[in-house]
Image: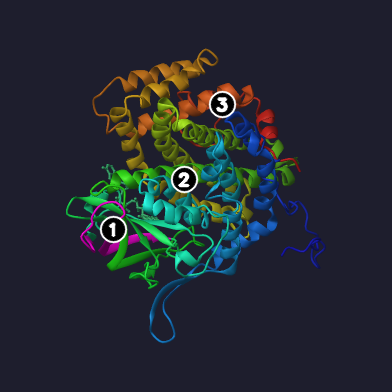
Amino acid sequence: MIPLKPLADLPTHEVTNMPPHQGDQDLWQSDVALREGVKREGAGWVEARLADFGKVAGASETFEKADRANRHGPELKPFDRYGMRINQVEFHPDYHDLMAVAIENELASFAWTNDRPGSQVGHVALNYMFNQAEGGVLCPVSMTYAAIPALRTTPGIADAWIPRLLSASYDQRDIPVTEKTGATMGMFMTEKQGGSDVRANSTRAVAVGSGTGPDAEYLLTGHKFFCSAPMCDAFLTLAYTDTGLSCFLVPRWTPDGERNTLFIQRLKDKLGNRSNASSEMELQDTFGVMVGDDGRGVRTIIDMVQGTRLYCCISSAALMRQALVQALHHTRHRSAFQKRLIQQPLMQNVLADLAIESEAALALALRIARAMDEAGTNESAAAFARITTAIGKYWNCKRAPGHIVEAMECHGGPGYVEESILPRLYREAPVNSIWEGSGNIMCLDVLRAMFREEAALPAFLSELDLARSENSAFDAAADALKQELGKPEDMEFRARALTEQMAVLLQASLLIRHSPVAVSDAFCASRLGSRWTGAYGTLPAGLDFGAIIERAAPVS
Ligand SMILES: Cc1cc2nc3c(=O)[nH]c(=O)nc-3n(C[C@H](O)[C@H](O)[C@H](O)COP(=O)(O)OP(=O)(O)OC[C@H]3O[C@@H](n4cnc5c(N)ncnc54)[C@H](O)[C@@H]3O)c2cc1C
């Protein structure tokens, strides 16, 4: 704990020109773009709840717990004292506290328990705020959220599992799920010989009795190379039957009340996301129940992956927002060359550039969530959600690491030190780009959506058209994109460039329509200009830097 009044009078000198401790943050009240975006995208009815949660997520206590849970990562306990295999992972107590906060505040369940438009947007806002403090626990939380559509394909499993997965009770006990008040869900897809290419999986599934297909019981044998949150109660797992690659629910405990044969081999020593355990697993005659149709495992699990990809998009926006908040706090209180850093013109350029990137990333995530809200009743919205989830996952995740580095640099040396949150944010960022489909895979998925789903590209282009005639750079860039999309040759080579153009234009379209003109002007003048290299702090002169910074700056 930081003392309330630290001593500034040291024996040799007085400590001056250092920012005050930031204290509790109100992640809702201080974030104008979030408040506006939530209302705009149809979740105005969640405001009171978000206002309460903004204080919980932003409390110093939450940040301190996250810091400890990441410093003191999980430990594998494969055996008990008598040499019996238990396959357990022990976490720091703060990890469990943070899991409880996330589950009790419905970060996994809100989108499904509130059957009204705006629930996906509310889900995004809750996760966006919490993720500013902690990403590790949101791995199992986001997988639990994302598993619901896949489980709904198979009624027997849905009835048994969904009520517990949607429970707002965090029950960390390693006991059969029928005795638990709440449950969490992970997923096992990646194997050593293939992660992106899951058809290279070698794990086999053999039916236990005479029944096969959805809801039938199987035994799985093989391995999985990346299994995050291995203390979840069940895992959606890909394995081959004679029909083809299929999806199974693999529980920690079998229906007979025995430990399932899930052998955790070791935990990964990861760059970031260290509060969360990621493991390697062996499956040997491991009990599982088929989810979805036999041989259609990729189709079944893709419903889950859509949700976790949205999470990566939200998480990247959240990391950028918190990095920006830290940079604004520091530069507002630190002086150099007779001025506050925040008043130095070149620093204003950097801060404003970070601010527009952060606002654009959030706007994108909220817009995708609204499309998900509408997808059940609107085919065009479903197609829009399908293509923009891949676009948003690619672009927000690509922009986050560089953004955080720049926010770190705004602090000078203290930003590089672990006591600031910047190193942890920085380490957290790259995983969002790698898991749930790495960057190239996302761009290839954008092409797939364009070519396989007739409604996807028209829905996307119509959204751009809504912002026409407001900004000449935008109009020109939207025309250029249409030309690019009209050239079928070498599409795969150009997939990153195309996806980037689509992402930036969609963000610009949202900012032009919904943000102050200072923000959208700066975004279009830089991102859609010919000189943009992607480095931060390179906005053209003449923009309203003060207005952009003021909008982003939290109320102190
Ligand atoms: C911390 C962490 C936790 C994870 N947790 C889980 C988990 O819980 N469950 C799970 O199933 N997996 C998990 N993963 C695995 C993750 O989903 C995979 O690492 C990811 O899908 C990439 O697969 P791979 O590692 O086999 O890389 P590869 O598939 O070998 O890909 C390597 C690179 O090649 C690129 N590439 C692949 N194909 C093409 C192509 N056709 N054209 C161009 N480029 C291509 C990829 O984009 C990537 O950049 C986790 C990973 C990490 C880092």
User: Which residue is most to the left?
Assistant: 242
The x, y position of residue 159, in whole percent, is 43, 53
Residue nearest the observer in this picture, 341 or 489: 489
How many discs mark residues in the rendered view? Answer: 3
The x, y position of residue 30, in whole percent, is 70, 40
Q: Which residue is mark 2?
A: 312
For the residues labelled 1 and 3, the Cα–Cα distance comes to 41 Å
Which numbered tag is attached to residue 511? 3
Please tell me whether residue 360 is drawn above or below residue 151 in the rendered image.
Answer: above
Do callouts 1 and 2 mark residues in contact (Cβ within 8 Å)? no
Earlier along the polypeptide chain: callout 2 or callout 3? 2
Q: Amino acid at mark 1?
A: Glu
For the residues labelled 1 and 2, the Cα–Cα distance comes to 21 Å
Q: Residue at x 78, y 54 (%)?
A: 16
Q: Residue at x 27, y 50 (%)?
A: 198
Which numbered tag is attached to residue 191? 1
Q: Is mark 1 within 8 Å of ligand 1?
A: yes
Residues shaded magenta = 206-228
Quadrant where the N terminus sits is bottom right
Please tell me whether residue 503 is drawn above or below residue 294 in the rendered image.
Answer: above
- Res. 348 visible in picture: no
> On the rendered structure, is 466 left or right of 282?
right
Judge the density around disc 2: few (<14), some (14-19), many (≥20) Cα neighbours within 10 Å. Answer: many
Q: Residue at x 22, y 52 (%)?
A: 200
